[in-house]
Image (cartoon, rainbow, N blue to C red):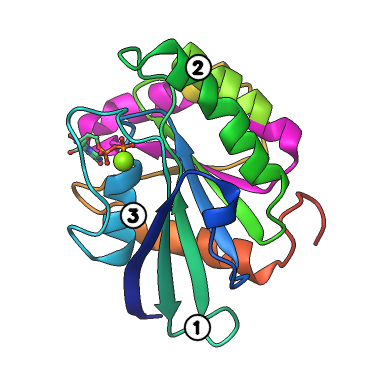
């Protein structure tokens, strides 16, 4: 499978601004700085497509990236970059906006096929735990992605994964995909998981 094009379409703050063309959407969720933008750039092989930041948490917008793939079954999709949560330095009012904004989007977009839920493989935060439960309750399909795996030695991996699974109270059948934007490890598996979300149709877990 080739990526024929990957293009930033728009940043939205209100639902009226969301793209109206009904393409399937795969949504990146995770705390600020977890590596969402880096993952989008690695997935698409486009270095500057999503802005990678060392001073996270500023953006409160939903970014839509349109991808065209050489995949006959599901050739077009949006990768959607949600604003990160849990950045302490943003004001309370900005933090208070995150939940309703995201909840409204996820509950009212039938074209959402699934979520990529990003968690730093070195350990989930309490906020990740809360978000995980909340996402689970929405009933959308999701792929849990442990980011920045290049930061662990081979020996540290299994224990870190066990802590991650335990802290997030993951179902034993729910896989965790290990990923690094730095080494590109996990990129092919992630694409396979995304195509699986797209090919299965509806976004509700267990619907297909
Ligand atoms: N070592 C390492 N650093 C990463 C990786 N992915 C992202 N980063 C770094 O983490 C910081 C935040 O990344 P970014 O993609 O902007 O995170 P976002 O806020 O979730 O969009 C940046 O300094 C990135 O260079 C990774 O796979 N490995
Ligand atoms: Mg980002």
Mark 3 or 1: in front is 3
Q: x%, y% of residue 178?
A: 39, 42
For the residues labelled 2 and 3, the Cα–Cα distance comes to 22 Å
Q: In what quadrant does ligand 2 lie?
A: top left
Does any portion of residue 163 appear in the rendered image? no
- What's the residue at 48%, 23% (across, down)? 164
Find out if the beta carbon at label 1 lies less than 8 Å from the nearest ligand 1 atom.
Answer: no
Which quadrant would the N terminus be assigned to in this image? bottom left
Q: Residues within 10 Å of mark 2 (few under 14, many from 20)?
A: few
For the residues labelled 3 and 1, the Cα–Cα distance comes to 18 Å
**Tag 2 residue:** 127
Asked which quadrant contains residue 152, the reply is: top left
Find out whether the residues at labels 2 and 3 contact each other: C-beta distance under 8 Å.
no
Upstream in the sequence, badge 3 or badge 1?
Answer: 3
Image height check: is 33 above or below 113? above
Upstream in the sequence, badge 2 or badge 3?
Answer: 3
Please, what secondary structure does the residue beneath circle 2 have? helix
For the residues labelled 1 and 2, the Cα–Cα distance comes to 36 Å
- How many callouts does the rendering have? 3
Which quadrant would the C terminus be assigned to in this image? bottom right
User: From the viewer's perspective, is 47 left or right of 74?
Assistant: left
Image height check: is 127 above or below 135? above
Please, what secondary structure does the residue beneath circle 1 have? loop
Q: What segment carries the magenta color? A: 135-162
**Tag 3 residue:** 40
Please, what secondary structure does the residue beneath circle 3 have? helix
- What's the residue at 72%, 49% (across, down)? 108
Image height check: is 107 above or below 113? above
Find out if the beta carbon at label 3 lies less than 8 Å from the nearest ligand 1 atom.
Answer: yes
Upstream in the sequence, badge 1 or badge 2?
Answer: 1
């Amino acid at each position: 499978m080739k990526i024929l094009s990957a293009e930033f379409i728009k940043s939205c703050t209100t639902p009226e601004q969301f793209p109206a063309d009904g393409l399937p959407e795969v949504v990146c969720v995770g705390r600020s700085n977890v590596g969402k933008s880096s993952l989008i750039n690695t997935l698409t092989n486009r270095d500057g497509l999503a802005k990678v930041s060392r001073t996270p948490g500023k953006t409160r917008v939903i970014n839509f990236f349109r991808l065209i793939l050489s995949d006959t079954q599901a050739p077009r999709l949006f990768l959607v970059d949600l604003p990160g949560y849990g950045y302490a330095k943003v004001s309370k009012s900005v933090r208070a906006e995150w939940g309703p904004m995201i909840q409204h989007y996820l509950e009212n977009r039938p074209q959402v096929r699934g979520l990529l839920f990003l968690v730093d493989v070195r350990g989930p935060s309490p906020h990740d735990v809360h978000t995980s439960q909340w996402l689970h309750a929405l009933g959308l399909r999701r792929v849990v992605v442990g980011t920045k795996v290049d930061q662990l030695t081979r020996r540290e991996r299994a224990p870190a994964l066990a802590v991650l699974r335990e802290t997030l109270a993951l179902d034993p059948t729910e896989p965790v995909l290990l990923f690094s934007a730095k080494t590109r490890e996990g990129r092919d598996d992630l694409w396979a998981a995304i195509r699986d979300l797209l090919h299965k149709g509806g976004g509700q877990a267990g619907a297909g």
